[in-house]
Amino acid sequence: MDKLIIHGGNPLHGEVQISGAKNAAQPLMTAALLAPGTSSFANIPNLRDIDTMLALLKHLGVTVSRENGTLHLSADNIRADDAPYDLVRTMRASVLVMGPLVGRLRHAKVSLPGGCAIGARPINLHLKALEQMGCTITLHDGYVEVDGTHLQGAHVVFDGVTVTGTENIMMAAVLAPGTTILDHAAREPEVVDLANFLTRMGANIKGAGTDRIEIQGVASLTPASYEVMPDRIEAGTFMIAAAITSGDITLRSCPIDALTLFTAKLREAGAIIDIDANKVRVRGPRRSKAVSITTAPQPGFATDLQAQFMALMTIAEGTSTITETIFENRFMHVPELHRLGANITIDGSLAIVRGIPQLTGAPVMATDLRASASLVLAGLAAHGTTELRRIYHLDRGYEAMEQKLKRLGANIERVRDKPS
């Protein structure tokens, strides 16, 4: 198992290329199941979660090839309609095969999903929507079995905002007879990216990016080529890296339009942000100012950037509050930040962060994907050496993060961790 050794204190300078978005790539890859033939995707990031999704697609019968950085998925012969536990347990996004399998084959059997330990993320909203569309749901032995023999369009009102639920039902609906209306739909940019690809395949979708999506089912789809959007969470993480190290970083291929509220909060904290076409330059202040945030679905402050922003607030001037409204367990990084000297008090879904002048390096352990990133950022700002263990979480969602940071001047190294 690997770990990162970070010697903090270096202001980061230079340019960084933002990779394709993991959270956009995964639903796009599963959408290839909807049509026989080969769909091609550019800008797919090289990540553990992408490899897991490819393994699942291969199990279903998809032929996978890569050429000059482009991923080709051929779904001519879908030989299975199940997503087994061994492939699903490590990654919740595996449940995204359910929608396209029901849409194309009218049947799916999917293990209940796993992933990061950041709280319960049930798929009941997906299943309730499929039932409203005429499907029969059976739960047994840790699996969800969906019989879509009578799949048809319906008016679905989600009880809560669900990104993967919106994506799953959208993929089932594009091949369902009649009209499907999704009310209280997720508005995230990744949902829009999926809708754009489905439209390119021949789907009839209106309203993606709003809370009401209308889908007119079609008889069949054709494969298509598409370029995955840049990763807004990776971009936000590197923007914070500039701020927390008092650095000067220019981000290439930065989806700044998907980071409106986050950008406003970072500016409020003292960062200078210049936007020029698809390049964004971020200059960090000598010391950031305390800024309070509340996570919320799009267009609110993304929960996937909460932990990273908290790392910045630990050394900000003043006291900030961070309210987490999406996941009940998303403060698991706080005890590790305490080890670096942070002054954070937790009261339910509220974190009170009292900024201190300087963090101090220490051994820490990642608990989930975004917590990993927050500890890397804290280590970059800390005095002394930080050792970050369990970085396999980081490898799930950040492409070559330590290499990118090295090119920006960070003193960071990946080494093999000796068993204790």
Image (cartoon, rainbow, N blue to C red):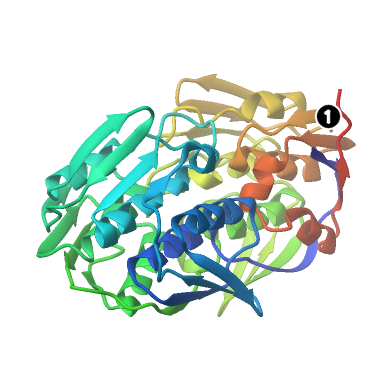
Which is nearer the eye, 198 or 230? 198
- Residue that badge 1 annotates: 362
Query: Which x, y percent locates residue 190?
Result: 42, 61
Q: Is residue 367 left or right of residue 211?
A: right
Q: Which image quarter: residue 327?
A: top left
Query: Which x, y percent locates residue 18?
Result: 64, 66
Q: Residue at x 38, y 42 (%)?
A: 110
Q: Residue at x 66, y 80 (%)?
A: 68
Q: Name which residue type carries label 1.
A: Ala
Q: Secondary structure at mark 1?
A: loop
Q: Is residue 300 left or right of residue 303?
A: left
* Few, some or many residues within 10 Å of mark 1 (<14, 14–19, 20+): many
Q: Which image quarter: residue 217?
A: bottom left
In this view, 128 is above or below 185: above
In this view, 359 is above or below 132: above
Which is nearer the eye, 286 or 99? 99
Q: Is residue 334 left or right of residue 98?
A: right
Q: Which image quarter: residue 390?
A: top right
Q: Residue at x 45, y 75 (%)?
A: 39
Which is nearer the eye, 310 or 255? 255
Which is nearer the eye, 159 or 235? 159
Query: Which x, y percent locates residue 28?
Result: 43, 64
How many labels were placed on the picture? 1
Query: Which x, y percent locates residue 154?
Result: 11, 54
